[in-house]
Image (cartoon, rainbow, N blue to C red):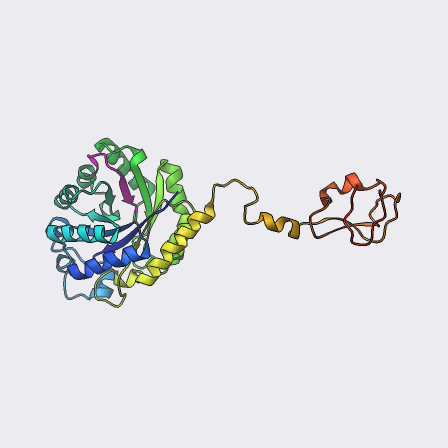
Amino acid sequence: MKTLIIAEAGVNHNGSLDLAKQLVASAAAAGADLVKFQSFITGKSISRQAPKAEYQKSTTGTDESQYEMVRKLELSRADHEELIEECRRHGIGFFSTAFDSNSFDMLIDLGLNQVKIPSGELTNLPLLRYMTRLGMPVILSTGMAGLGDIEAALDVIEKAGTPRSLITLLHCTTEYPTPMEDVNLRAMISLKSAFGVEVGYSDHTSGIEIPIAAVALGATVIEKHFTLDRSLPGPDHQASLEPQELKAMVDAIRNIERALGDGIKRPSASELKNKPIARKSLVASRPIRAGEAFDADNLDSKRPGTGISPMRWDEVIGRTAPRDFAADELIEL
């Protein structure tokens, strides 16, 4: 099964449409399936009194409020339309997360056919209900949530009109960057077991090893922030991959997909040629005369594996040699 890889551009365009277009090109060059932005009207999702998170303070300072910081990162409808066209030009899917109902309506009007609900909206009942009433596939991030929070959200989503079969839960830790000891990747498996849905992983760690491990553990969706340059100003750049790292992650995930296989244990086509070289056969450990009984003193097992298998040892012991055998010669019956 192919993993859906979402390259999270988020707000790393810094409010610049030109930079956003460069992010589209970079995500496409890396081989991601979708490039995802964030769609919001600041005044409808953030109050003027909302404080910045600690990581936002460390990356953007304390001279402005969260409202003021985010307001500069809004994308207009015209911006969205240009980015959708840019995605078509580069052969990558456009995707975005809506943070309010007006932005969601715009995305639907622009043709999006699946919903991404960010971790911060998991407990926003009115928006959950509004965004899932159309019965489209839903990807729900679960950062900061326990099983009870997730169960409540799923109940809202199902009652709104989206069946559980269309829901994918993303395990996530909402800290930028996430310390390795807080990843708890096995929780992704717990989500699948607890709720019977497809699962994936939205990653905020530094580096690429954790999303790769998540795919090996069964993730069907991977979401990862990326930027053109981690040194750029803005809240999310420092916890994002640079283009060459994003490509390395995508390539590694595609290798993991091929390596996982179908689960049937059998010799592979590539290894069959090595079977006669690596396995062993019964050979004479010393010269054996015709009519002499085979025993532990005159038999041994050595490469190559083109003769009688050593697994037939008990069958051969006690039988008589049909002819003379030189030392190291393959035994024949």
Q: Quadrant of residue 90?
A: bottom left
- As drawn, the residue found furthest toward the front would be 323
Would you say residue 187 is visible in this rendering?
yes
Q: Position of residue 82 (x, y in %)?
A: 15, 53
Count of marks, rendered view: 0
In this image, 84 relative to 210: left or right?
left
Would you say residue 151 is visible in this rendering?
no
Instruction: Determine if the magenta segment contains residue 140.
Output: yes
**Residue plotted at (28% across, 65% down):** 230
Q: Could you say which is closer to the camera, residue 273 or residue 57?
A: 273
Q: Which residues are magenta?
A: 132-142
**Residue plotted at (20% across, 35% down):** 134
- Image quadrant holding the N terminus, namely top left
**Residue plotted at (24% across, 37% down):** 136
In this image, 47 relative to 206: left or right?
left
Instruction: Determine if the magenta segment contains residue 41.
Output: no
**Residue plotted at (54% across, 46% down):** 269
Q: Quadrant of residue 108?
A: top left
Q: Quadrant of residue 127?
A: top left
Q: Position of residue 239 (x, y in %)?
A: 29, 61
138 vs 35: above or below: above
Q: Position of residue 35 (x, y in %)?
A: 25, 52
Q: Position of residue 70 (x, y in %)?
A: 16, 57
- Image quadrant holding the C terminus, namely top right
